[in-house]
Amino acid sequence: MNRPGIFEPDLYFGDMSLDAFAGLGKGGEPWQSFEKASAFVADGNLPQARAILESIALTPGIESRVRIQAWHSLREAGGQPPASVGNDVLGVVVEVGMKEGQDFLAIYADQTAYYYNYSGASVIWLRPDASLDGQINSVLAAARAILPLIGPWKAARRPSPGAGDARLNILSPMGLHFGEGSLRLLDKDRNSRPLLRAATATMAQLTKLPRR
C-alpha cells in the first residue's frame, strides 16, 4: 500500500469505500483485483465481487491493512468471512485524546506498526528486523483475549476521543470492535488494562526509533 507515512485514519482502519481504496493503487496486484471487484459491484454482480474480495483477503502474505480492507469491502457487498477466520485479530488501533490533538498507534498482524504523535511527529515500523515482534505480539495477544467480549460495531466509525479519553480498536474480518473511556478507567478495568499497557509499552519502544 502506498503512502504508508501519511496520517489518513481510513488507511489504518481499513474501512474505505471500495472505489476509493481501489483508486490508491498503481497497477499490479492486489489493486487490479480490487478494481475488478469494484466494477462487478457497479454492475450489480455482487457474488462475483465477493468471490474476488475473499480471494484477496485470504491471499497468503498479503499486507494486513489490505486484508482488513478486503474483508470490509466483502461485508459491504453483502458477504461474511468464513467462520474459520472471522475472529482473527488483524490489527489494533489505539486513539488517545490530548489537549493538543491525539496520539495514534496502529499495530498489525504482519508485525508492522505506525505511531503518530499529536505534535505531528511519526514513527513507521515496516519490520526491517524482528526486534519488535515480541512487543507487537503482546498487543495482539491482549486483543485476542478480549475480542470475544466485544461484538462488531455496526454503525459508522465514531469521531476521535476527547482529551483524557482513549479508544481501543480491534480490527477483525468481522469488522471493528472497540472499547472506550477515560484513560484512568480503562487502566483499572481488568479486561482493557492488559491491552492498554501492552500498547503503551509498544508506543514507548517506537518513540525510541528515529521519527519522520
Image (tube, rainbow, N blue to C red):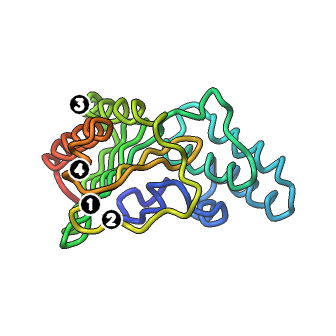
Cα–Cα gap, marks 1 and 2: 6 Å
**Residue under circle 1?**
165
Q: Position of residue 105 (x, y in %)?
A: 30, 52
Between 17 and 191, the one lying in front of the other is: 191
Tag 2: amino acid: Pro
* Residue that appears at 37% across and 34% down: 140
- The crowd level at tag 3 (other Cα within 10 Å; few <14, some 14-19, many 20+) is few
Q: Secondary structure at mark 3?
A: loop
Q: Is residue 100 above or below residue 128?
A: below
Q: Are marks 1 and 2 in contact (CB under 8 Å)?
A: yes
Residue denoted by label 3: 131
| Quadrant position of residue 139 | top left
Of label 2 and label 4, which has the lower sequence position? 2
User: Splitting the image into 4 quarters, where does residue 130 fall?
Assistant: top left
Mark 3–mark 1 contact, CB under 8 Å? Answer: no
Q: CA distance from mark 4 to mark 1?
A: 9 Å
The image position of residue 9, as x and y in percent, is: 42, 63
Which of the numbered marks, if any, corresponds to residue 161?
2
Quick one: label 3 or label 1, which is nearer the N terminus? Answer: 3
Query: Which of the two discs, 3 and 4, sits closer to the camera?
Result: 4
Badge 1: residue crowd in 10 Å (few <14, some 14–19, many ≥20) = some
- Reading the image, the residue beneath label 4 is 185
Task: Say above or below: 63 vs 129.
Answer: below
Q: Is residue 136 left or right of residue 75?
A: left
